Image: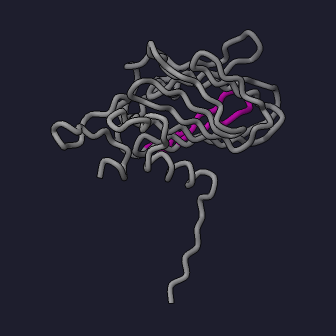
Amino acid sequence: YAKLHGFAWDHTKQQVSDVTISRKLCYGYNLLITHPFRESWVNGAEMLRFSENPGQGQCHDTSVHSSTRVGSWTRTLWFHDGVTDILLEGSGDPVTYQIVTPLLESHLETKVAAHHFEIQGDSFRYTILTSWSAANPQFTNGVLNFELGFEKELRLRIITDEVDSFYPKSNQETSYFESIMIKDFFAPIEKFLVN
């Protein structure tokens, strides 16, 4: 059950335990996400909209679907089981969309591929997937910047997952839950024929 749904497993007690990054989605009064990451919109040096401090606004631990507009851009999100899907649509003035993750003392940032980024701490991992790499996102200090304006649509998936540190080198491997969510993002439709 823990493996299938991406929960933490306490090997000593042999039971499901609390996850490091809670499986809830919080957004502020301006409808921007405050947990499990924060989002911001920037136009040059001007901050268009930014999410409030964590803990303000509303939190949900069940499926969520919401939408908000920033200038000529619309951000629609779907949240379920620690997975946040974001669709950015629009055109017009170029803006920067930022995903800001909390940094712990020890973390490792990795650009796995053109469409795949990771931030990993001792007990957690953020996996960020993008539908295209034309924006050439900049990734520093836990912040991923997307330059919008050239494409009319960008899909993102942010997966929060536990890191298994029980087995040797298991913290360097993708969990079963994470691998299914990655496959579902890049190849969402499968066809099975049964005789």
From the top left corner, tell me how far across and down residue 36 is, in percent.
Answer: 45, 28
Residue 76 lies in the magenta-colored region: yes
- Residue that appears at 36% across and 52% down: 4
Residue 88 in view in this figure: no
What stretch of residues is rendered in magenta? 64-77
Q: Relative to 191, say whether 2 is above or below.
A: above
Residue 181 in view in this figure: yes
Instruction: Name the quadrant containing residue 167.
Output: top left
From the top left corner, tell me how far across and down residue 22 is, in percent.
Answer: 35, 31
* Of residues 33 and 107, the one drawn nearer to the viewer in this rendering: 107
- Residue that appears at 48% across and 17% down: 103
Instruction: Name the quadrant containing residue 142.
Output: top right
- Residue that appears at 77% across and 14% down: 44
The image shows a total of numbered marks equal to 0
In this rendering, would 72 be left or right of 100? right
In this rendering, would 82 be left or right of 119? left
Image colouring: one colour
Q: Relative to 12, say whether 40 is above or below.
A: above
From the top left corner, tell me how far across and down residue 193 is, in percent.
Answer: 55, 82
* Of residues 184 and 152, the one drawn nearer to the viewer in this rendering: 184
Residue 20 lies in the magenta-colored region: no
Judged from this view, the residue extending furthest toward the left is: 13
